[in-house]
Image (cartoon, rainbow, N blue to C red):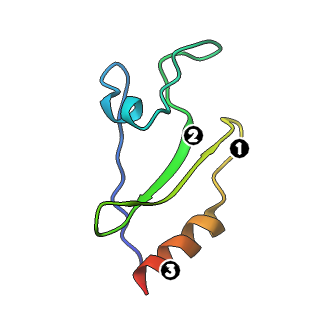
Amino acid sequence: MMRLPMCADFYPHGEVTQKFGILREAPPVPGICERAVFIVDKLGKIAFAKTYPLDHLPNLEEVIETLRRLRA
């Protein structure tokens, strides 16, 4: 079993999404963030980052494989 801490950052508070460059400020849906996955390693470095179209789910196999590699 993997435990995954997650970050939620809702508009207008959006500080995290702004810093990661994924806050949508233009139409068609301003004020929400892009669909994205960031994995931060134990040293605080981004080990994986990918944005996806809003109408697509993240590739979970790709994400899980990255987590497994980091765990090893």
- The one of 18 and 34 positioned closer to us in this rendering: 18
Contact flag, marks 2 and 1 (Cβ < 8 Å): yes
Residue 69: mark in rendering: 3
Q: Position of residue 4 (x, y in %)?
A: 38, 64
In this view, the mark in front (1 or 3):
3
Q: Position of residue 19 (x, y in %)?
A: 37, 34
In this view, the mark in front (2 or 3):
3
Decide which of tag 2 and tag 3 comes sooner along the chain: 2
Q: Position of residue 70 (x, y in %)?
A: 44, 77
Q: Quadrant of residue 39?
A: bottom left
Tag 2: Cα neighbours inside 10 Å, few (<14), some, or many (≥20)?
A: some
Amino acid bearing label 3: Arg
Question: Disc 2 and disc 1: Cα gap in Å?
Answer: 8 Å
Amino acid bearing label 2: Arg
Residue 56: mark in rendering: 1
Q: Does 29 sit above or below residue 47?
A: above
Residue on which the image places disc 2: 35
